Structure formats: C-alpha cells, structure tokens
Amino acid sequence: MSVLPVIARALITDAQFTSCRSTVMDANPDMSAELAGRIVEEGLKFVAACATNPGTGLAPSRIVDEGWHALILHTAMYAELCEELGGNFVHHFPGYDPTNYDPPIIDRTRETIAALGYTADPELWGPPSDETLVFVAAQCQHAPDCTIVITPKPKPRVS
C-alpha cells in the first residue's frame, strides 16, 4: 500500500469528491458546500482508518456517517477506494438506533485517523443531539453493538 495523502479528499478525484458532496447536499438542501465537503472528507478519513486497520472496531459519528453514506452510494468509486486503501472492503452494517453513542469507540476511531496523519474535525465527531449541524438521512448510529466489520481481501486459491 502506498503512503496516504496528507489531505483525505485527495483519495478520490475532484469530480468524485464534488459528486459525493452533492449527495450530502441533496439530503440537506440548506447546507453550504463547505460543510458538505468537510463531511465527505471526514467520511474518507473514516474509510481509510477502517480499511487500513481491519478488526479494530471503529465507528463514525452520526454526522460523519452521512459522508460515509455518500461515498457508499458511489459504488464503483467506493470499491476502487477500498481497493486502493489495501483491498479491505469496508462494509456498512447499520445500527438502527440514531441515539446510540459510545464515546470510547468514537475516540478510538479519531485516534486511528490521527495515526494515519489526518486530523479529525472535532465539530463533526461529537455525540448525536437534537441540535446537530445536519439532517442525517439514514437512521443509524454504529456504536456500541454495531461496529464496522471489514472483509479482508480474499487470498488467491491454490490449486
């Protein structure tokens, strides 16, 4: 695997980033492009953390989950991103309780992001609340019982 770029948005092309940002904005019509971009970038950091650290039990914040969902909806790009990050496909297993929140899992996720050289946006990694920055389209929160499961790249078959 190659060294990760300093800026997570460089993991995908500008056109792909713009399309994912638009997906976030479609669910949040009054959102600024700047905030939607921050959300997608945090989603990229999250995917990079999961793909490069399988089995660590990471989870996104509720707002970052919105960025991750936007990435997932771009299926070909998302599969390519996971492949470029080492081949560990980061599957989504939703937890259906949007109030579910486990600070230690979020802390571990931010620490894993930092270990990759990225800085987690503190405003986007907080607990869910009635006063969140965005409307989160999916009703899921991935902690504590629903951490992300990584499927390792299959090993070639030996005949």
Image: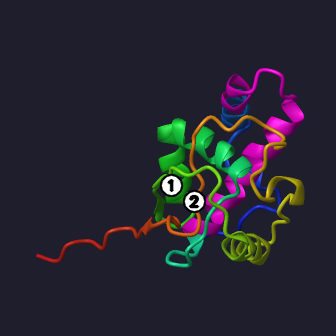
Residue at position x 68%, y 27% in the image: 27
- Quarter of the rendering occupied by the C terminus: bottom left
Residue 28: within the magenta? yes
Q: Nearer the viewer, residue 115 or 24?
A: 24
Residue at position x 49%, y 58% in the image: 83
Picture quadrant of residue 30? top right
Residue at position x 81%, y 59% in the image: 126
Instruction: Report the side of 156 relative to 103 (left or right).
Output: left
Amino acid, disc 1: Gly
Look at the image and give the residue range highlighted in magenta.
Answer: 23-51
The residue to which callout 1 is attached is 95
The residue to which callout 2 is attached is 142
Q: Position of residue 90 (x, y in %)?
A: 49, 59
The answer to whether residue 11 is above or below residue 85 is above
Q: Position of residue 41 (x, y in %)?
A: 76, 49
The answer to whether residue 31 is above or below residue 48 is above
Amino acid, disc 2: His
Q: Position of residue 131 (x, y in %)?
A: 84, 42
Instruction: Report the side of 88 relative to 63 (left or right).
Output: left
Mark 2 near mark 1, Cβ–Cβ under 8 Å? yes
Residue 32: within the magenta? yes
